[in-house]
Image: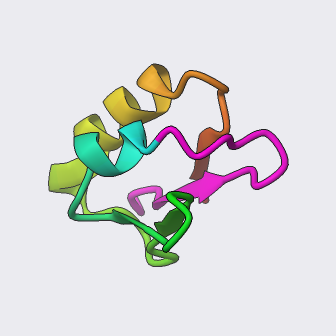
Amino acid sequence: MRQRRVRLRVNPITCEGHGLCAELLPEWVRLDDWGYPIVNADPVPPELVEHARRAVAACPTLALLLRLE
């Protein structure tokens, strides 16, 4: 059985640049010069999926999303 891949996405319209995602998941999210997240487009490695879920749950504007492929 093939394991499903997980990708992290950010909705740029709802994001207000709080930066919490980069604090909680610095391995996968960095901030641009204005404090908005730049998310790695690769599938999230299995060892970081739980951390990614926590970052998504903590986003104050619900702009961070996990997508299953």
> Is 4 above or below relative to 40?
above
Q: Is residue 5 magenta?
A: yes
Apparent side of residue 55 relative to residue 35 in the rendered image (left or right): left
Where in the figure is residue 44, as x and y percent of width and height? Answer: 36, 62
- Horizontal and vertical percent position of residue 47: 15, 52
Most extreme residue toward the right, as rendered? 13
Q: Residue furthest toward the left? A: 47
Q: Which residue is at the front of the view, 19 or 43?
A: 19
Q: Which residues are magenta?
A: 1-18
Quadrant location of the C terminus? bottom right
The picture places residue 41, in percent across and down from the top left corner, at: 52, 76
Instruction: Say if 30 sits above or below 60 in the image.
Output: below
Question: Image quadrant of residue 55?
Answer: top left
Task: Answer with left or right where residue 30 lies relative to residue 39.
Answer: left
Q: Is residue 29 above or below residue 17?
A: below
Q: Residue at x 58, y 50 (%)?
A: 68
In the drawing, does residue 18 fall left or right of residue 13? left
Considering depth in this image, is 60 or 35 the residue closer to the camera? 35
In the figure, 37 relative to 63: above or below? Answer: below
